[in-house]
Amino acid sequence: MTRDFVGYGAEPPHAQWPGEARVAVNFVINFEEGSELSYPAGDAVSETGLIESASTDAGNRRDLAAESMFEYGSRVGWWRLHRIFTGFNLPVTLFACARALEANPPAAAAIAATDWDICGHGYRWIKHYELDESAERDQIARAVALIRQTTGKPTEGWYCRYAPSENTRNLVALHGGFLYDSDAYNDELPYWVRVSDTPHLVCDAIFDSGVQIGLKRALTTKLDLVDATEGLKEGVLNDVGSITEATRPGWEPAACPSRQRETLAPEEPAQGTRVSGPRLREQICRRSR
Ligand SMILES: [Zn+2]
């Protein structure tokens, strides 16, 4: 892959969001518990990333605490996020690992009942850059099939858990059925590239923009969701991401007494034109193409 240091350059296109909105937000929930490394899953190592306390070893034994922390995400954190977003009637893009959906049939059924869209986050957490081309092709195909089997939904985007390989974008395009991939961090507006002479849409995953929730703080109430949208920028596609395994209540209403937590009507943020993730991305890109 060749590198592009220029992008849109000095004059990025006007986003022209639907309804002349000034700010566009794509809410993202990572759904991935059970896709992490663990002995019960057949790995000879236990997950050490994204756990609540610093790991005291290299994951070279079964870590029941780590396993339990991930289970919190699928048992509790996920449902809290589901209640918040369905309460607001806000569409969500799920960064979903196929094996996590398989591990939690009630959650998969709840996802099936929404109009939320799915960006494939791997069959499981696996380093795609370590796979040869045929193994990676197989991983992508298995993920798409299992996401369809568990939710009835298509996999509209692709975003690797770790860095992609040099083949990932090509394999995603060749697989077909995807609208975009998010294996990029180099822009704040979606953009087109050519893959095998065919236009392919790239929508950056932006997790250092200050609106990532879950890693930096817990999303525990409706107002946290509104707080999390502070700092959103005009004219770009803002991703607000949340990771279900990191949603344990971290700060309570008492910690910020000036905030009127319960004054928000559930429908408030949903006013205006509502377009879900991939559709929104497509609309933007049609204009910027
Ligand atoms: Zn993830």
Image (tube, helix red, strand yellow):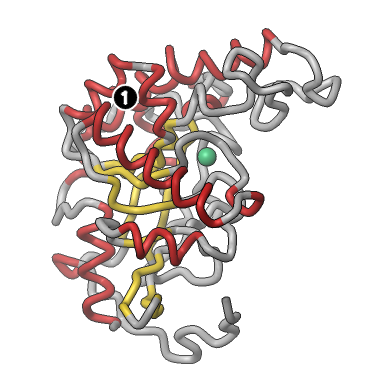
Quickly name the residue at label 1: 262
17 is higher (above) or lower (below) than 131 = below
Extreme residue toward the bottom, this view = 10
Q: Quadrant of residue 194?
A: bottom left
Residue 113 image offset from top left, x and y in percent? 16, 27
Q: Nearer the viewer, residue 208 or 134?
A: 134
Residue 198 image offset from top left, x and y in percent? 31, 78
- Measuring 55% from the left and 70% from the top, which residue is drawn there? 186
27 is higher (above) or lower (below) than 84 = below
- In which quadrant of the rendered image does the C terminus lie? bottom left
Extreme residue toward the right, this view = 57
Q: Is residue 226 visible?
A: no
Residue 78 image offset from top left, x and y in percent? 39, 23
- In which quadrant of the rendered image does the N terminus lie? bottom right
Q: Quadrant of residue 153?
A: top left
Q: Nearer the viewer, residue 289 or 90?
A: 289
